[in-house]
Amino acid sequence: MSDLGARSYLRPRPGYVIVACAAITILCGAIAAPPSLILGQTPAEFAQRRERLRSALDGILLVPSSVTTTDRERFRADNDLVYLTGLELSSGMLALLPNGAEGDAKVLLFVNRRWGGPTLDRVKEDSGLSDVYDYREAWERLKPIIGRIPKVYVAGSRADRTAMEPDGGLEAYVRAQQPDGRVLNGNPLIHNLRVVKSDGEIANIKAAVRATVEGMRRGAARIRPGTSELSVEGAVLAGFREGNAPREAFPCIVGAGPNSVDLHHDPTERSMRSGETVVVDIGAEVHYYAADITRTFPVGGRFSPRARELYNAVLQVQRDCEQYVKPGKTTWGELDSYARAQLRQSRLRGTTSSNDLETLDRFLTHYIGHYIGMDVHDVGQSASPIPVGSVLAIEPGVYIPAENIGIRIEDNYLVTETGLVRLSEALPRDADDIERMVRRR
Ligand SMILES: [Mn+2]
């Protein structure tokens, strides 16, 4: 493999989907062509995000990004910069200026062209932004602006900031323009916005869910005594690619028998045995958006009576959680406590390592769920109520090492005014249907 200088380059219009509407236009004559989509979203969605951020700003917001990858990884641009521009820029910086700064451009994009890539004109055309400059001009161009607006929010990871700072550091640079200038953390400004998804983002998550469902079906059909966890993962990944997912949102988890209690189990060559449960927790990524779905299957096609009673208890908790969430009111902490209370009420017991019997809540060893979006464990405050327009994963489970049995069921939901909509509804979850998925060849 050739070394592309840490693969830092602006990729030429990678995720652009031109909506095929020529036939409709010919038939209907007057209907205008819909806009080209950028990573599954309209250009207006990106512009709206920038405007919503800007309208609430009381300072300058800088979003620097410098993504480096190893030979082992496929290139992936920075979430926040993709979120605000639609560009898969490996190195650059967006500057958003507050209202009231007369005479200034309000949105400036600086592109690091050290490794080549498309021209600035091409970037302008692709992004719809008019003020696009070479990154080498960034700090010179920002100097008079920071002189007038000395409050500077900076987003991104510490590594991004450090890589993109002017000589001597950002704090010193800001104070050189204004003695009482301040540098503040800009991440919460963007991340609070990212919790509620736009139509295009929801379409992307739905596409990721479809690819994940296809992966799950193929993975399930591969499960039988003697098959390895790696073989099941291979079938899953083929389904992802079939669904146009270029990568996984997180490494596939496939764990059978004793490995089913290992929450983030990396697939191995171990052969599955009849009667074991196998936890398959997978998520495809499409247009930078994740899905995150788990099913637990019986090796051999029939749950043991013990596995089935535990499976049904976990499934009931998931169903209860779906009803419990009141959009705009319930917090994650409340949902987690509720799920544990439901497990505690079950008449079933699990065996501890010291051979005691305990209620099932004792065996749910992780949190009940999380937001999903550009990250599989997406941004958002767990203390705030779950808002309408957010997307969730709810994933109850029980893991009982003394019995070599782990069960997890995870689905993805869009939060609407009237309650949760299960986006992964196409994938069966009743025990009988799950058995049928394994027996299907
Ligand atoms: Mn999850």
Image (spheres, rainbow, N blue to C red):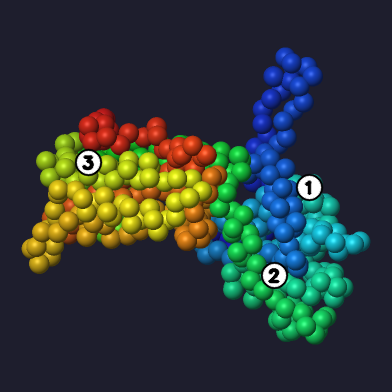
Q: Earlier in the sequence, mark 2 or mark 3?
A: 2
Q: As drawn, is 331 to the left or to the right of 42? A: left
Which residue, as the protein is rendered here, is positioned at the far left?
Answer: 355
Task: Point out residue 23 in the picture as x, y percentages from the top left corner.
Answer: 69, 19
The image quarter containing residue 251 is bottom left
**CA neighbours of label 3 inside 10 A, class few (<14), some (14 to 19), many (20+):** some
Task: Point out residue 346 in the picture as x, y percentages from the top left corner.
Answer: 19, 48
Which residue, as the protein is rendered here, is positioned at the far right?
Answer: 103
Q: Residue at x 50, y 58 (%)?
A: 384
Q: Residue at x 44, y 51 (%)?
A: 330
Residue situated in front as seen by the camera: 400 or 224: 400
From the image, tell me which residue sits under label 1.
128
Residue 153 tag number: 2
Q: Residue at x 17, y 59 (%)?
A: 401
Residue type at mark 2 is Tyr
* Residue 246 seen: no
Residue situated in front as seen by the camera: 210 or 432: 432
Q: As drawn, is 177 to the left or to the right of 431? A: right
Task: Point out residue 3 in the picture as x, y percentages from the top left corner.
Answer: 59, 63
Residue type at mark 3 is Asn
